[in-house]
Image (cartoon, rainbow, N blue to C red):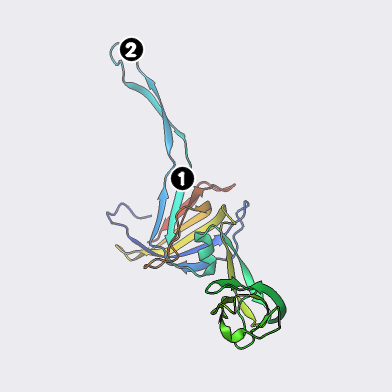
Amino acid sequence: MPGYQDTGLIVAGDVFMGEVDSDGNVGALRGPINVPSLAITPNTVETIERQSYKKATYGQTLDAVNLPNEAANLTIQFDSLPAIQLAEALAGKTVAIDDAADTVTGEAHTLEEGLWIKLAKSNLSNGSVTITETSGSTDITADCEIDHAAGLVRANTSAAATDVTIDYDTDAATGTRVLGASEISKPRFVMVEGINLATNKRVRVEIDRVVLSSDQATELMGREFISGQLTGSLVTLEGKDSPYTMDMYD
């Protein structure tokens, strides 16, 4: 261990995050995540003082003890937002989308001129939609507008604003669905593998378990890249001396 050397500290690092259970078992890590800010706030304390009532030192403090109040906490901001990280920002979790191609016949709706109705399914196959009047069995597809991706239909004329049945095919689709606001408590392991830009020497931070939650609004329709923010308390695991470590390498 070297002696004291006066250096500054600016960390550039690859951040990795994974789920962790109460026993400290860490799952697969996602990353590197682009993290503009990762801030650790130490424990807050309640100070208990014993004051002097003696003549010579009246009003002065004879003893002071800091008792723990709130736990140390982590605030992490990120703008890497594949679906799994978007779920973190939206206090949610993910499930796989694996929709097979399908055929739907006779789906009943009442169309209104200029207003959309939502079909039971989306990802409609181009050219597969047939819209038929319930009364008279007239094909009025040409009088309607169809949003195939969204699965929406609307009547473009007053004559088409009537009771209908709709036949259509759907295309197979895969992806990831975010179930927003479905996971408010997120126990996570966080690791930063980086360098001190002031010295070009390695730095590593490992946070064994932090119980995070999303704590800011997510602007989905803004003019800037979407970012997420999580905040939570650091937990010291059984057998560990601290909730996190920061290694400064020679």
Query: Does residue 37 appear left or right of residue 106 in this picture?
Result: left
Residue type (three-letter) at the residue carrying disc 1: Ala
Contact (Cβ within 8 Å) of mark 1 with mark 2: no
Q: In percent of the image, x 38 and y 55: which residue is there? A: 1
For this orientation, the residue located farthest to the top is 55
Location of mark 2 (residue)? 54
- In the image, residue 248 lies at what x, y percent? 39, 58
Query: Does residue 112 appear left or right of residue 195 in this picture?
Result: right
Q: In percent of the image, x 28 and y 13: which residue is there? A: 56
Relative to 155, does residue 60 appear above or below in the rendering?
above
Residue type (three-letter) at the residue carrying disc 2: Lys
- In the image, residue 235 lies at what x, y percent? 53, 47
Location of mark 1 (residue)? 72
- Residue 27 got which mark? none
Relative to 171, does residue 30 appear above or below in the rendering?
above
Q: Residues within 10 Å of mark 2 (few under 14, many from 20)?
A: few
Q: Secondary structure at mark 2?
A: loop
Q: Which quadrant of the view contains residue 62?
A: top left
- In the image, residue 199 lies at what x, y percent? 31, 63
- In the image, residue 159 lies at what x, y percent? 59, 79
